[in-house]
Image (spheres, rainbow, N blue to C red):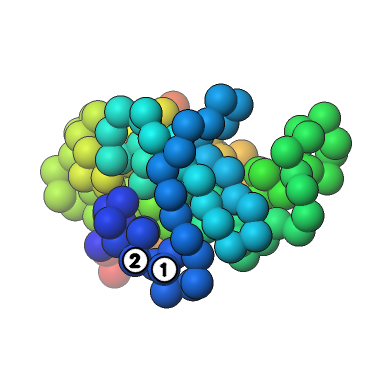
Amino acid sequence: MINLTYDELLREADSLGLVVREKSLWSSNGRLKGSKIAIRKDIATLKEKACVLAEEIAHVELSVGNIIDQNIVSNRKQEYKARVLAYDKMVGLNGIIEACEAGCTSFYMTADYLGVTEVFLMEALESYRMKFGLCTRFDNYIIYFEPSLGVMRLYK
């Protein structure tokens, strides 16, 4: 099961040698500088903090240099790659299947099951739709992204 909590992500960050602090940030929900991650302290829910922290941890693995200026194409690409890695970590194709198997029948239920915000889930699904098209096969399942999210188990 995916469903990484904020506390689990804090432990992961610690194991990677990262220091995470909640601070006042004006222009973003999270910021990475060296081995320090700042999370905006007035974020309302732990789910939202988890989504932000997952992306900042992804930046540690993928990003090079200062990418704050999103007017630069290479910076936007690095930002997108970190988001996709965070989507895979927090949602993933396996998570979609698990949520369906657990009886989730709405975005709200699926997001709650996975421990992410509805916005994060919708962005993840849009990212997967852009990557895979209308549907994709994963293990013994077909996951449909359009016209709405659906999972079908394949039987032999």
Task: Name which residue lies at 58% across and 62% down.
Answer: 35
Q: Is 141 rendered above or below residue 131?
A: below
Amino acid type at mark 2: Arg
Where residue 150 sits: x, y (%)?
Answer: 33, 39
| Residue 48, disc | none
Crowding at mark 2 (Cα within 10 Å: few <14, some 14-19, many 20+): some
- The front one of 40 and 116 is 40
Q: Does 145 sit left or right of 68 as displayed?
A: left
Disc 2 on helix, strand or loop? Answer: helix
Where residue 82 sits: x, y (%)?
Answer: 61, 51
Q: In what quadrant of the picture does the N terminus appear? A: bottom left
| Residue 14, disc | 1
| Snapshot quadrant of residue 121 | top left
Amino acid type at mark 1: Asp
Task: Name which residue lies at 39% across and 35% down.
Answer: 41
Where residue 87 sits: x, y (%)?
Answer: 48, 48
Q: Which residue is mark 2?
A: 11
Asked if labels 2 and 1 touch by Cβ distance under 8 angstroms, the answer is: yes
Crowding at mark 1 (Cα within 10 Å: few <14, some 14-19, many 20+): few
Q: Is residue 41 visible?
A: yes
- The front one of 19 and 136 is 19
| Snapshot quadrant of residue 11 | bottom left
Task: Name which residue lies at 76% across and 58% down.
Answer: 64
Q: In what quadrant of the picture does the C terminus appear? A: bottom left
Q: CA distance from mark 1 to mark 2?
A: 5 Å
